[in-house]
Image: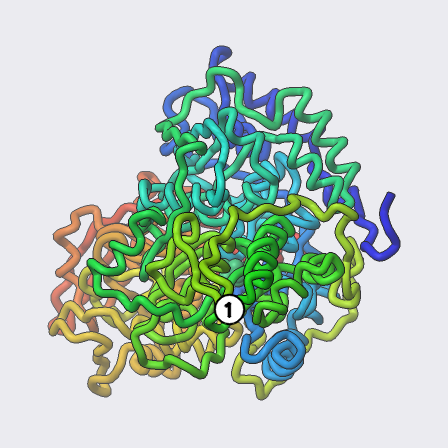
Amino acid sequence: ATPSSVPVKDFPSITPPYPRLLKTLDEVRSVLPSDRKLTLAEKILYSHLRNPEESLGGGGQIRGERYLKLRPDRVAMQDASAQMALLQFMTCRLPDTAVPASIHCDHLIQAQTGAASDLPRSIEQNKEVFDFLESAAKKYGIEFWKPGSGIIHQIVLENYAAPGLLMLGTDSHTPNAGGLGMLAIGVGGADAVDALTDTPWELKAPLITGIKLTGNLQGWATPKDLILHLAGKLTVRGGTGRILEYFGPGVAAQSCTGLATIANMGAEVGATTSTFPYSDNMRQYLHATYRGPVADAADAAAKQGFLSADEGAEYDEVIEVNLSELEPTLNGPFTPDLATPLSKFSEFIKENNYPVTLSAAAIGSCTNSSYEDMSRVASIAEQAKEAGLKSKVPFLVTPGSEMIRATIERDGLQGRLEDVGATVLANACGPCIGQWKRDDHQGEDNAILTSFNRNFKARNDGNLKTLNFLASPELVTAFAFAGDLNFNPTTDSIDTPNGPFKFKAPSGDRLPPVGYTAGDLSFAPAPSPKPIPETEIAISPSSTRLEILEPFDSVFAAGPAELPELTCLLRVRGKCTTDHISAAGPWLKYKGHLSNISENTLMTAVNDEGGQINVARDAQGEDTIPHIMQRYKARNEPWMLVVDDNYGEGSAREHAALQPRFYGCGLIVARSFARIHETNLKKQGVLPLWFADKADYSKISAGDKVQTEGLKELLAGTSPDGQIRLKVTKPSGEVLTIETTNTMSADQLNWLRAGSALNFIGEQARA
Ligand code: F3S
């Protein structure tokens, strides 16, 4: 039964479309060799293919080679990244989203003194962003989770995650939802817009690393310790282009929320995502979160073999971990893959001359704020209280959602933490993402312990000298009472007036014995809201943070043609990542304002002609690269770039393609492109070409006039060879012809013709 205090779930919109997925899987099996066994990750991915024959047919290697055209089931967006995703979505003027979607206000809430004052202050400071997101949610029928409702990944786990589902989220820890046996993948806004507009979402079929778990966790060891240990083994790059698929007898014993913690931090090894076979614990979690019908549907799908790997399925690599031997582990500082077992931690601190005194302890976040986590840390707090101890350092608790907060409050767990000195923060990201107004230790070397997932320099409090060690919430809590990094709670005692005190291993409940309570329902959206098309989008024309995105013009409105003559603005030398093209840090606040954020375009790129950073020239003289781009835009003079190898590596950040396009870039010619960025350029209507001969890179210089030859035929479908040549006219009058290659598919030529992929989608929808 669903208690009246918990929102009734709209089951049709959250139950995976199992009949359709199973049917597609049958088609997949008919395309593949009859003896081909599938891993769980393959079953989920391939059952979401739009056309199995097109993506998998013809034999040959699939994993690591083929591009899959997929149809995700759902999209989740957080408040920072949702801004540009929605602004882009709006340009295609569709009435609603093609798949259910949700927006979560969590990243913009700053922690200072505690939830009661932090939440209203942050709402006030970010009002224009929240108002915009809410208005867009209303207009397009997106579920809007207000500030205070909780952290995106916890809310997704509690409400939307389901076995076998394929979800995209505009946040790198989206894989957290893998704890419920699905594939949840973190993407940039442009990919989210693909799913929102029913455009095929492309993914290179990942390799699959099988992680075989045997044994069971003992004493202080937790699921967090497993992923901390694995991060040490795999390093921050070990999962790149891979899905981590867990299997073996050790999986079924783990709680669903423990699996979510493991999946969450798969992002730390660069994995595309992580997943687990459907288990009884997942079923129980679905029931506990009032999704009995989803559990029933998953049970039926599991009986048909959908929610686990085929017997004998092969992995690209297998790593085995015996959970019985796993030790509590602490990772850091400054990188999540520097793993040290607890028994060696004190020695490690000494060897590296790190500060021994702990300066703060923080638990919770999207990674570790389950009922189980809170119940186990409360057992430690209770022991400490009985021994007369209080936390020696600021001890911050971030509940992952309002449901968790209300449930731990009702069950007395929050009280037990507050009794020993904890401050409960708002249900939001807070100190995990630098939203921590920390008044002490600024500029000083100091060590903190957190149960979060990342520990890059300055991530938490903006102080480059803060060392953040990642650990389980249980370990972080025990250390808070010792205040000293030499402490080992499994062996050491703490002195008290009544003599030495030693902790017993933590214990707790996996799920609330009397069920979850929803807490303040005013934070939550009505399930499956209908779009209200007449809603005005709330963006003030004087805003510095938000700006309506105008659709880009097409130069092909009159039909197939060559690009207009372009001037080469710059030849970029060497490594140029999406960070070089569109820097993060202080610029993040302009994510929803293309004119303002564009002022960072290529500001750390090296000009190959002279070797200087952020310097370019035009007829008016020398200036910064963005200023020169602005001058071109003001003159309405189209321009192009020459770039080096692997241009645009790093991330799916769509701003790196939007910004040059906004300033008037029509063409980028590279020695090579990073694939995701190349696709993003195509989506924004910029033509990416590759030098047929990489040595030609130096033949085009700033100020040269460049004309395409062969594009008109390519757009008209009459090109004899599919290639485009560049006619380059030097200021001296000398003319060169440069051969290029390209990867433009028929669909992508449509994007170019329409001015952008979104223009094309809009045209199609209105046709
Ligand atoms: Fe937020 Fe940190 Fe998780 S920023 S989404 S709590 S990783």
Relative horizontal placement of residue 42, taking residue 98 as reference (left or right): left
Mark 1 lies within 8 Å of ligand 1 (Cβ measured): no
How far across and how far down the image is residue 94, in percent? 68, 59
Q: Residue at x 48, y 11 (%)?
A: 35
Image quarter where the N terminus lies is top right
How far across and how far down the image is residue 54, in percent? 50, 29
- State whether residue 458 is above or below residue 234: below
Residue nearer the viewer, 763 or 296: 296
Relative horizontal placement of residue 638, taking residue 671 as reference (left or right): right
**Total marks in image:** 1
Residue nearer the viewer, 384 or 477: 384
- State whether residue 630 is above or below residue 304: below
Quadrant hosting residue 255: top right
How far across and how far down the image is residue 88, in percent? 56, 64
Binning the other alpha carbons within 10 Å of mark 1 as few (below 14), some (14 to 19) or many (20 upward) gives: many
Which residue sits furthest top?
35
Is residue 310 among the parts visible in the rendering? Answer: yes
Residue nearer the viewer, 239 or 261: 261
Residue nearer the viewer, 109 or 582: 109
Relative horizontal placement of residue 306, taking residue 687 as reference (left or right): right
**Identity of the amino acid at label 1?**
Ser
Q: Residue at x 57, y 26 (%)?
A: 308
Residue where numbered disc 1 is placed = 391
Q: Residue at x 44, y 37 (%)?
A: 243
Is residue 432 among the parts visible in the rendering? Answer: no
Relative horizontal placement of residue 235, taking residue 242 as reference (left or right): left
As helix, strand or loop, the secondary structure at mark 1 comes to loop
Figure coloring? rainbow
How far across and how far down the image is residue 610, in percent? 11, 74
